[in-house]
């Protein structure tokens, strides 16, 4: 015998052997044997003579182990599990977009095991010969999703906003800013961590990234995705204006122009990431986009997510490190005596960023250290020409014949033309 547990299109099979099912054949044979062997000789003769009194219908019955039934149902419960689907919310093209939630289900192991026991009993009561297959309707329980559309009704207020400007001349960098800004847009549920690496990678031409300037070991070089750190820094400043918990941030090796000292965040594949966690009780929505030569980041959330105080910042330079001595590099493509600045000198800086909290009356309530940043000093690099240029050969001197006035006027004019050119 086999038992089929079914629920809609889902089914699972349990063999009778696995629930310890066995027939009571020994007991049936005993009863059958005793029917013809009871009593004395006269009683036996009487039963043979009156055979109608000897009609005896015996049926095999199966026994099973209730604990094994429950264990087998437990073993197949995952087949009936359907995960609930949470509602979602996102910000697209300036509007909030939601998707509906859906309930899930799970198998009620105890109730289904009891149903199998009941059906097996009814099967043998109703049929002298049981079926080889017994079907049982599974008992399932509904699982409600954690988030429904109503969960997002109160998270559509702007709790922080920040923007930075950029020069529209570099088309590759502009493309990278636009792609990266759109990629950071997402909903962050309570307890979730935002990782810039997870949002921005992979850096490929297929997704829209282009080559542009990047800072590598203190030098400006071309690289795919150049400029995305401006998106990281814009996002960092928007996060600083909230109560979200920044868990990973690294400043650039050199200072940047689009945010104040101490308020930048950089990124490098496989080595430097920018991360923060939603430590609030409600979801937040991050929106990034580019428009009118600006990178914009807005963070939406519930009223309760808004900081209690007005937030301002103060960058304090705690140490200045002079730039190293100028480096001179011979350049055979430049004429000897000519110098050209390849890299300008920069003093290094150690910067401490303070977060200032003000109450509604404009009174300073607290001043806390937000981060410490170190910007490396950089030596100037000047290229010096080494190419020797051969002197220009002297042009032959042409003397004017004073008697030209007695010659043909046209001939005299032609003779004077080279003299005018040398002047």
Image (cartoon, helix red, strand yellow):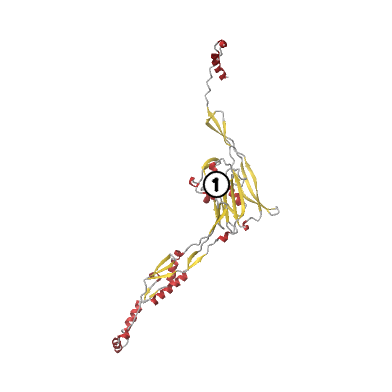
Picture layout, residue 247 above or below residue 166 = below
Q: Is residue 215 visible?
A: no
Q: Position of residue 356 (x, y in %)?
A: 66, 51
404 and 195: which is toward the camera:
404
Picture layout, residue 330 above or below residue 214 = above
Residue occupying the far bottom of the picture: 42
Picture layout, residue 264 above or below residue 410 = below
Find disc 1 in the rendering and name its residue.
178
241 and 322: which is toward the camera:
241
Residue at position x 55%, y 46% in the image:
178
Residue occupying the far front of the picture: 409
User: Where is the N terminus found, in terms of image quarters?
Assistant: bottom left
Around disc 1, counting alpha carbons within 10 Å, would you say few (fewer than 14), some (14 to 19), or many (20 or more)?
Answer: many
Q: Position of residue 132 (x, y in %)?
A: 36, 71
Location of residue 166 by image quarter: top right
Q: Position of residue 391 (x, y in %)?
A: 53, 23
Picture layout, residue 393 above or below residue 194 = above
Q: Is residue 254 left or right of residue 22?
A: right
Location of residue 52 by image quarter: bottom left
146 and 197: which is toward the camera:
146
Tally the marks.
1
Q: Position of residue 241 (x, y in %)?
A: 62, 52
Q: Is residue 206 visible?
A: yes
Q: Is label 1 in a helix, a strand or a loop?
A: helix
User: Where is the C terminus found, in terms of image quarters?
Assistant: top right
């Amino acid at each position: 015998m086999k038992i089929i547990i079914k629920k809609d299109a889902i089914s699972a099979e349990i063999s009778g052997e696995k629930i310890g099912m066995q027939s009571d054949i020994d007991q049936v044979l005993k009863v059958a044997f005793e029917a013809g062997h009871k009593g004395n000789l006269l009683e036996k003769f009487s039963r043979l003579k009156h055979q109608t009194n000897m009609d005896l219908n015996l049926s095999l019955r199966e026994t099973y182990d209730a604990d094994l039934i429950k264990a087998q149902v437990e073993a197949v419960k995952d087949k009936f599990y359907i995960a609930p689907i949470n509602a979602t919310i996102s910000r697209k093209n300036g509007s909030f977009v939601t998707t509906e939630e859906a309930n899930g289900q799970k198998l009620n192991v105890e109730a289904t095991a009891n149903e199998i026991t009941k059906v097996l009993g009814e099967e043998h009561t109703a049929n002298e010969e049981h079926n080889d297959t017994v079907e049982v309707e599974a008992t399932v329980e509904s699982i409600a999703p954690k988030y429904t559309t109503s969960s997002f009704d109160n998270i559509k207020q702007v709790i922080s906003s920040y923007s930075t400007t950029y020069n529209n001349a570099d088309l590759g960098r502009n493309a990278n800013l636009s792609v990266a800004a759109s990629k950071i847009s997402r909903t962050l549920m309570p307890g979730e961590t935002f990782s810039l690496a997870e949002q921005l990678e992979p850096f490929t031409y297929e997704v829209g990234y282009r080559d542009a300037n990047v800072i590598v070991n203190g030098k400006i070089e071309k690289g795919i995705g150049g400029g995305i750190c401006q998106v990281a820094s814009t996002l960092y400043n928007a996060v600083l204006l909230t109560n979200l918990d920044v868990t990973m941030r690294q400043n650039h090796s050199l200072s940047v122009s689009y945010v104040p000292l101490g308020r930048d965040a950089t990124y490098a594949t496989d080595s430097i990431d920018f991360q923060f966690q939603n430590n609030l009780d409600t979801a937040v929505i991050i929106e990034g986009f580019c428009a009118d030569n600006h990178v914009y980041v807005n963070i939406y959330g519930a009223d309760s997510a808004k900081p209690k105080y007005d937030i301002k910042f103060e960058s304090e330079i705690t140490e200045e490190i002079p730039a190293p001595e100028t480096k001179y590099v011979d350049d055979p493509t430049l004429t000897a005596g000519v110098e050209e600045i390849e890299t300008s000198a920069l003093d290094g800086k150690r910067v401490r960023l303070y977060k200032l909290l003000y109450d509604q009356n404009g009174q300073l309530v607290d001043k806390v250290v937000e981060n410490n940043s170190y910007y490396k000093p950089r030596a100037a690099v000047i290229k010096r020409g080494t190419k020797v240029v051969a002197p220009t050969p002297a042009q032959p001197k042409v003397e004017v014949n004073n008697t030209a006035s007695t010659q043909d006027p046209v001939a005299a004019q032609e003779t004077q033309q080279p003299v005018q050119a040398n002047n």
